[in-house]
Amino acid sequence: MFSIIIPVYNRPDEIKELLESLSVSDYEKEYEIVIVEDGSKIDCKKEVEKFKDNLNISYYFKENSGPGDSRNFGMKVAKGDYFIIFDSDCIIPKQYLSEVENELNTNYVDCFGGSDAALDSFSDIQKAINFAMTSFLTTGGIRGGSEKLNKFQPRSFNMGISKKAFEDSKGFGNIHPGEDPDLTIRLWKLGYDTRLFTKAFVYHKRRIDWGKFSIQVNKFGKARPILNSWYPEYSKLTYLFPTLFVLGIYFSIVALVFGLALPIFCYVLYFILIFCVSLLHTKSFKIAVLSVFAVFKQFFGYGNGFLQSYVKVILLKQKPEIAFPELFFKV
């Protein structure tokens, strides 16, 4: 049986939309939903109660300890033997659970990840951020479902893990963000495989403004050198690209001052390409312009965070919990 685990923090409206989408699922077998309220000041209990007649749903309130620990809590109390984890800002297509079951029956794996997409009802900024986070021109299309590698690192807004794999790995750690690849690598070390389920996508709403988006990707950048220090055998050269991108822009500006325009021209061409691809994908001039802005913020936020963390953690050998306490929850 599937157990759907959903941690939530001060997001009752999001839970309402998520549960509404699950209430029209075409999956006919029994499954349960476990809502874990992570110490919210604005809880979603009343929203959950509205769906108890139509969904097999349970609600738990605990002290705030972060999304990773809340997911672990949910998996410990769940009754199923395969856990599916969503973020509260996701909307689930009606065929999602059927697609997951088909994938597991065809080629079973103890941990999978799915991609994300944008609904027409999303705001223009949400669509632009979704493009930046899923395009092959930025992340290589990994979040958008075009990952071709044998070993896929699931993201915890849309992932599944067997009960056995959870118990063997002890679940998520206390780093956030970065808890997803940390868990994935530990699963690999235990002999478990992971895989991308291309048809098991969700609509990821990402209710964030530009400032919050910058903070989010900056934290992503800070987390990566920490993970590289823990698991150097799984570090990749591609993780450096956003930082090289940022340093390249600084170099291009200096070069332009000295009359060398080619470097900055290459960046202009790249952002024109971003605009054109987004325009073709979204059919919106405004979203295409916003996509350029989103990609710029994505690279600068991640690149600067990675560089800062690389210096402190890799070069200066500072303990990650001391260098970046904001990335670690106390559990």
Image (tube, rainbow, N blue to C red):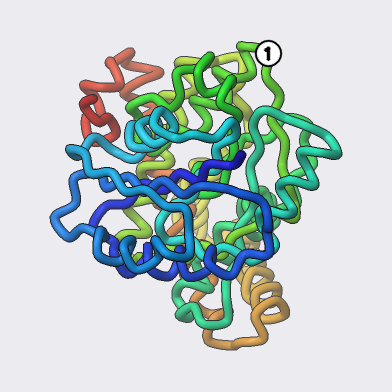
* Label 1 packing within 10 angstroms: few (<14), some (14-19), many (20+): few
Q: Amino acid at mark 1?
A: Gly
Foreground residue among 68 and 131: 68
Q: Is residue 308 above or below residue 199?
A: above
Per the image, the residue denoted by label 1 is 191
Q: Residue at x 78, y 43 (%)?
A: 103
**Residue at 64% of width from left, 48% of height from top?**
114
284 w.r.t. 48: above or below: below
Q: x, y percentage for residue 26?
A: 68, 64
Indicate the position of residue 5 as horizontal and vertical percent values: 45, 44
Question: Residue 90: x percent and y percent?
Answer: 48, 61
Specify the quadrant that holds the N terminus.
top right
- Secondary-structure class at tag 1: loop
Residue 265, quarter of picture = bottom right
Q: Quadrant of residue 153?
A: top right
Name the residue at 42% across, 61% down.
Answer: 89
Furthest residue in direction left, as rendered = 41
Q: Is residue 239 above or below residue 18?
A: above
> Camera-side residue: 279 or 102?
102
- Residue 308 at least partly seen: no
